[in-house]
Amino acid sequence: MLKAISFSLITSSIILFSGCGAQVTAIQKNEIASYKARGHYVEVKSTGTATALGILPGGGSFYTESYGLGVINLLLWPLSILWEPVNGYNGAEMINYHATRQTIFKKKQHETSLLERDLEDNKIDMKQYISKKRIIEDNYQTEI
């Protein structure tokens, strides 16, 4: 009876925690590919390091700052080796995705602000402004 309960608990834990890490969607993966192709990708956390640390008890989750999940995976070690490397990879990828989007937003906003200042100071005319603004938009656009 105790073995059946233990097996049931272990099985349900594996099913429950195998998808706990944040995963980027297919659309987000396409955005990441576009960011990389344009040289805009920001890597805050290494997906390789996160995956490798996933072999350690809760390592991938702690590395990607998912502390609650890390504690759970620590408690479920060595079973968490089945899902923790994937959770670590997904967590690092999600962190990098958001860092990239935030960086792109700030750069685009800064360049647009400088361009608007040039227009206000009469350094450029409206035609030049529109042309340069399109260049900025094209530079930071993602191809999905």
Image: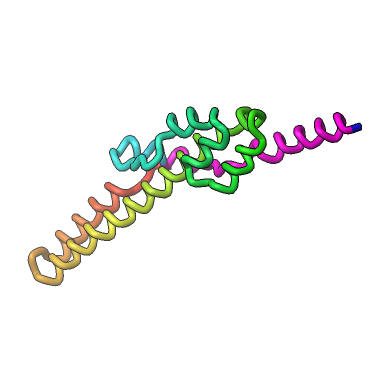
Q: Residue at x 47, y 38 (%)?
A: 29
Q: What stretch is highlighted in magenta?
A: 2-31
Q: Position of residue 69 (x, y in %)?
A: 59, 44
User: Which sits in the foreground, 131 or 13?
Assistant: 13
Queried whether the magenta region covers residue 60, the answer comes back as no
Q: Is residue 26 visible?
A: no
Q: Residue at x 29, y 53 (%)?
A: 137
Q: Which residue is drawn at 40% across and 39% down?
A: 45
Queried whether the magenta region covers residue 6, the answer comes back as yes
**Where does the N terminus fall, quadrant-wise?**
top right
Q: Is residue 112 visible?
A: yes
User: Which sits in the foreground, 62 or 119?
Assistant: 62
To which quarter of the image does residue 30 belong?
Answer: top left
Q: Position of residue 113 (x, y in %)?
A: 22, 64
View extreme (bottom): residue: 120
Task: Examine the rendered structure and indicate whether residue 3 appears above or below residue 115.
Answer: above
Q: Where is residue 131 in the image (x, y as percent from the top left)?
A: 19, 56
**Where does the C terminus fall, quadrant-wise?**
top left
To which quarter of the image does residue 126 belong?
Answer: bottom left
